[in-house]
Image (spheres, helix red, strand yellow):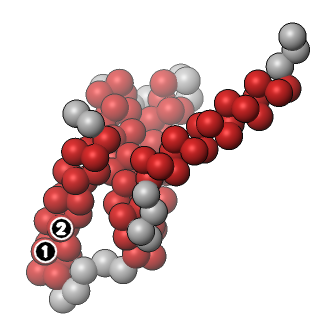
């Protein structure tokens, strides 16, 4: 699936969450609350990474890790849309900058 299609799919899911949040709380989450949800996802991700490194015992850690990485990607895509960031362009530009920066520091 192309990046744009992934981004659109992520936004469709965000719209579903907005409906659920409105049902539960009388309004959709703010951008800040979506970011706070992302922080929770990152915390869950770190617990799974600890499981992969042998520090925690979490059954089925491989599948849960894949799920949590996808959750985090969804959050990043959603936050980019909420803050009107062209994530595809930003990613491409940032990777170009990192490639040049690391390339300059590599020994010949």
Residue in the image at 38% along x and 33% along y: 65
Please say if 17 is above or below 26: above
Give how far across and how far down residue 45 sits, in percent. 45, 42
Return the residue found at the far bottom.
Answer: 26
Identity of the residue furthest to the top in this view: 108
Q: Are marks 2 and 1 in contact (CB under 8 Å)?
A: yes
Nearer the observer: mark 2 or 1; the answer is 2
Q: x%, y% of residue 4?
A: 28, 46
Above or below 60: residue 20: below
Q: Quadrant of residue 76?
A: bottom left
Residue 102 lies left or right of residue 13; in this view the side is right
- Give the residue displayed 36% in from the left and 64% down from the top: 81
Quarter of the rendering occupied by the C terminus:
top right
Counting from the top left corner in percent of width and height, residue 49 is at: 50, 32
Can you identify the residue that label 1 sits on? Answer: 19
Q: Residue 12 is drawn in which quadrant?
A: bottom left
Q: Which quadrant of the figure contains the N terminus?
A: top left
**Residue found at x 53% / y 32%:** 50
Comparing 29 with 8, the one in front is: 8
Direction from residue 67 to residue 69 in the image, left or right: right
Circle 1: element type: helix
- Using the image, tell me which numbered label, if any, was put on residue 15: 2
Q: What SS does tag 2 mark?
A: helix
Tell me the residue at 77%/34% (across/down).
101
Q: Please state if 88 lies on the left or on the right of 9 as rendered.
A: right
């Amino acid at each position: 699936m192309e990046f744009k299609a992934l981004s659109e799919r992520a936004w469709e899911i965000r719209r579903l969450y907005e409906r659920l949040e409105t049902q539960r709380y009388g309004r959709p989450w703010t951008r800040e609350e979506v970011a706070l949800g992302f922080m929770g996802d990152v915390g869950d991700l770190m617990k799974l990474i600890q499981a992969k490194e042998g520090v925690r015992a979490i059954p089925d850690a491989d599948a849960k890790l894949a799920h949590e990485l996808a959750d985090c990607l969804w959050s990043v895509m959603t936050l980019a849309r909420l803050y009107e960031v062209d994530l595809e362009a930003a990613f491409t530009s940032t990777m170009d900058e990192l490639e040049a920066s690391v390339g300059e520091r590599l020994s010949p």
